[in-house]
Image: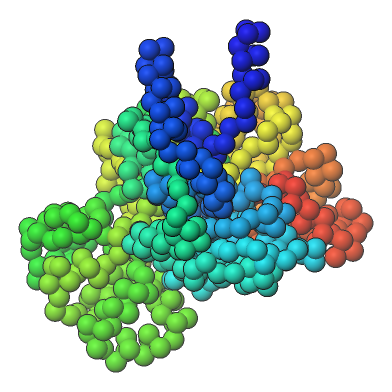
Amino acid sequence: MQIAAETVANIPASPLSGLQFSRLQQALEGLTPDQLTWASGYLAGQGAVLPAVQSVANDSPVMTILYATHGGNARNVAENLASKATNNGYTSHLVSAESYRPRDLSKEKLLIVVISTQGEGEPPESAQELFKYLNGKNTTSLADLQYAIFGLGDSSYEFFCQAAKDLDRLLQLRNARNLLARVDADVDFETRTSEWNQAVLKQLEQVIPADQARIIPLQQPHTSVRYDRNHPYQAEVLEKRRITTEDAVSEIDHLVLKVDPDSIRYQPGEALGLFFRNDPAQIDEILSRTGLSGDTDVSLHGETLPLSKALSERLELTQLHPTVVSAWTSLSGNPALIALNKDQNKLRQFSHEHQFIDLLTAYPVDINAEGLVKLLHRQQPRLYSIASSQAAYEDEIHLTVSALQYKARGRQYLGGASGYLTRRIDEGDNLGIYIAENSSFKLPKDGNTPIIMIGAGTGVAPYRAFLQERESRGGTGQNWLIFGNRNFHHDFLYQTDWLAYRKSGLLNRISVAFSRDHEDRAYVQNRLSDEGAEINQWLQEGAHVYVCGGLNMEKAVSQSLKEIIRLHGRLDEESAAEQFESLRTQGRYLRDVY
């Protein structure tokens, strides 16, 4: 061991980037001594033939690819660019905004950012520190920085790609220069991604002189499969059972999926992305109203398949997008639709309140099969909080699914994914899934840290995973669950789980708010206020606060917490707001809202 240590100590500093060194290690892994000897001679020979590569390529500017994501799409786009850059001989540093020191911006020459938007135009939680730094008074000039931004968003929302727009503005205020114009990509971002990758690589040729040699990385003969939205894993449904009573307002099911733990790994707080099949009855109505045959072959993203299969598995039917309404308006020429398209707020509202079948029914047009598939968007995966810990259920993923259902315009509506999961899928069926990482909603590294978990409805799902994880890992930190729903007898989700954890001592406190059980409706924010002194004491003891559920609920919770800090800390409003903000800065106020 001593000889090995001395040998390692005498190796000169590596001129390789971290990514190149990692790829080299992977390429050499598993080789026999004879194979290593041959590879050593081969590489040495390459070095002798191409001496200029080492002396020149290392002077090339390093490109930092920074991503800030909520559901994982930004990371996928960033990783794809990093891979293409490496294959073209450019060194790059791929890093999450959460792991990036904002002050290092002054050292950057080339910065590529992929960023999504959440809530009402806010950046992802992982990018909060970056934005805070750029908005601060002590930020230095970034005149030496060239950057490009790829924004991910949904134009059906008012604050489309707002985080990308704000970041672009902040960088320009610090004198940074555009390498490329900002891209604001909509829900169908795959085509824009491909075009943007090519544009970035082309610009790099201008930034890095063509006469400079590039380091061409070793190609990996064997790569492990990574499952993502473009390559979903097929998970078997092991169990499906309703966890609300038959007379409850909400129909909520508990699903158990079987996975291979060697292929699928996840952490508590992360979400599951999944694909679904649209309602066959709705597909039949679409075919009937358009007069099209489901057997007609269509071309979709380079694949030929029957129209019925495209409508069932590949296209979005339940979430109507404003761009689809606009395209339909061009085909129909209907005056009402034309007027609607002139007001973006009304167009977004119309899209949120209708499905494609409504558009087809109210404003019929003549359209062929190819025209229909080109007009509709690709089906977007739905994200569900994972309700299990892999430390407790290594080969399973648990989900809590509420059926979205309502009646309007004389028609009964059912959500696309939720309808499939609660009404049409059966035990033994397979479901296309992938893990949507969420590094901004995770348990404290120290298992002794107290946590307060606030959730309404299915927002309680990740807390089931949290407690399973803490039980499996032996964490001793105190745990407090604050849960809200409509009725105690109908909607107390996972009641037996919480009671068992309470009895075992793992769950130290549980506070509930059932809004329909009393005339004076109580919600989770009311329970916070009722127990404000204890909440404040837990905060003083270093508790982390988690909020999962609807955006409006989170707003009410944050307001209640500020009032608790003001009242029980005997502070003025400004000081209380600053202290609340410090919780976010310290990573002690974490949100998973939708």
Question: Where 476 sits versus 248, above or below?
Answer: above
Task: Write the residue at 40% across / 88% down.
Answer: 342
Q: Count numbered badges in the picture.
A: 0
Q: Residue at x 61, y 19 (%)?
A: 8
Residue 540 point in image, percent of width and height: 84, 43
**Residue at the farthest right position:** 570
For residue 488, above or below residue 304: above
Which image quarter: residue 431? Answer: top left
Q: Is residue 299 above or below residue 336?
A: above
Q: Give 62 or 437, whichever is nearer the viewer.
A: 62
Q: Nearer the viewer, residue 302 or 118?
A: 302
Where is residue 537? Give x, y as percent: 84, 43
When the figure is inspected, residue 186 is found, relative to residue 60, above or below; the finding is: below
* Colouring chosen for the image of the structure: rainbow
Residue 194 appears in the rendering: yes
Looking at the picture, how far across and down is residue 50, in whole percent?
Answer: 43, 38
Q: Quadrant of the N terminus?
A: top right
Residue name at image x 13 percent, y 54 percent = 305
User: Left or right: where does residue 92 sit relative to residue 483?
Assistant: left
Residue at 32%, 79% in the rendered image: 326
